[in-house]
Amino acid sequence: FRFSPLFAENREQIRRAEQLSDAYHLTFGDDELMVAYLLEIRDAHARTVDLAGSAALLETA
């Protein structure tokens, strides 16, 4: 999705996040685009971890 004015105002924070993670954005001509994805990670005990880093145990059968 395209950079909004909010992203443009926080360009330095975005740059730091890109340096410390696998986050990135692309530039096509004059358009800057953000790349986003969401992962759901489960282990063998059906525990999920959200992106905020907290774990929620799900009832297992």
Image (cartoon, rainbow, N blue to C red):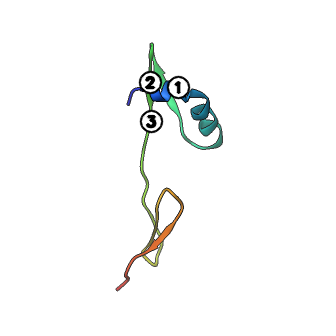
Q: In the picture, which quadrant includes the N terminus? A: top left
Above or below 30: residue 43:
below
**Disc 2 versus disc 1: distance between alpha carbons?**
6 Å
**Residue 39: x, y in percent?**
43, 54
Q: Quadrant location of residue 31?
A: top left
Q: Residue at x 54, y 40 (%)?
A: 23
Q: Which three-letter amino acid code belongs to the residue tagged 3?
A: Val
**Residue 43: x, y in percent?**
48, 72
Q: Residue at x 51, y 57 (%)?
A: 52
Question: How many marks do you count on the picture?
Answer: 3
**Disc 1 versus disc 3: distance between alpha carbons?**
18 Å
Q: Badge 1: few (under 14), some or many (20 or more) residues near its Cα, within 10 Å?
A: few
Above or below 44: residue 25:
above
SS at mark 1? helix
Q: Which three-letter amino acid code belongs to the residue tagged 2?
A: Pro
Q: Which residue is mark 2?
A: 5
The residue lying toward the viewer, choosing from 42 and 16, is: 16
Q: Badge 3: few (under 14), some or many (20 or more) residues near its Cα, within 10 Å?
A: few
**Residue 8: x, y in percent?**
50, 24
Q: Quadrant location of residue 22?
A: top right
Point out the frontmost of discs 1 and 3.
Answer: 1
Q: Which residue is mark 3?
A: 35
Residue 4 left/right relative to 20: left
Above or below 9: residue 16:
below
Residue sitting at the far left:
61
Q: Which three-letter amino acid code belongs to the residue tagged 1?
A: Glu
Q: Which residue is mark 1?
A: 9
**Disc 3 versus disc 2: distance between alpha carbons?**
16 Å
Residue 1 left/right relative to 50: left
Query: Do callouts 2 and 1 mark residues in contact (Cβ within 8 Å)?
Result: yes
